Amino acid sequence: MHRILRLIPPFTGERAGRQMKTDAIRTRRFTAIILGYPFALMAIATLVNLGLTGIRPLAVGLPTTPVLAALILSALLLLANHTWLMTSTELARLRYGMQATPEEWAESGGTPGDIAPEGHAELQRRHNAHRNATENSVIFAVLAGAMVLSSPAPLAAQIWMIGFAIGRLGHSYGFLSGQAGLRGGFMSVSLTALLGMAGYLLLALVF
């Protein structure tokens, strides 16, 4: 019995209590950061709109050449991003011997269980990148469509539309290369661009 007691580290309960308190403080801190994150990006986008782009009263009309050029360039960059993700996904399937449909699995004679965990993880990484790109691009399409028809300041259209597309390309690179910090940074760029477009349209309504 004494031998067993000697093997138990002293103050185990006290250490556990301190660890729980530290974890609770850490959780509260990160909760505050997560909740404050979108508001910080909103503030940045608003400052850019008010201090740099210039707000024009909303007036429905055909887009000017600079605005249309920004939309075209951003669309081309987003198409490049989609092509990149699509190609990377197919190369991952080829590398790990994975199939896309039950029919292809039956034809190959293999099963998903034959694939190494790394293969499933890499394919999941690409699927997650695809999903994130798609959900953000849908919002972009709505906001960009409204913006080009609202007679915006050309600089606003260029900053937010092209900035969004660049953010998506950087996000994909960070996702595929496994660089979480880079992925998060470019996610902030693209989200700020979405908030910037939404904020510009709202301000244009009231100016």
Image (tube, rainbow, N blue to C red):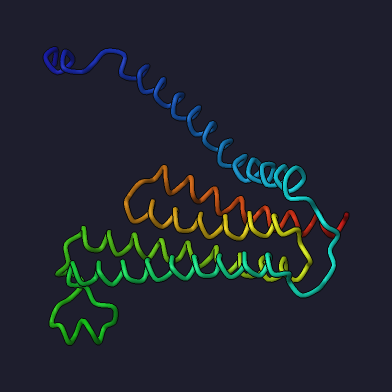
What residue lies at 66% left-to-right and 70% top-to-bottom? 68
| Extreme residue toward the front, this view | 65
Image position of 25 (left or right of 62): left
Residue at point 55%, 54% (across, down): 190
Give residue 106's position: percent from left, percent from top.
19, 85
Name the residue nearer the viewer: 105 or 180.
180
Q: Nearer the viewer, residue 107 or 200?
A: 200
Count of marks overlaid on the render? 0
Work out whether residue 92 or residue 107 is closer to the camera in this orientation and state it.
92
Residue 149 pos. (x, y %): 75, 71
Residue drawn 75% across the image and 55% down it: 200
Does 98 appear above or below 136? below
The residue positioned 42% from the left and 66% from the top of the image is: 130
Left or right of residue 21, residue 138 in this image: right
Residue 19 position, x and y percent, is 39, 24
Q: In which quarter of the image is the C terminus?
A: bottom right
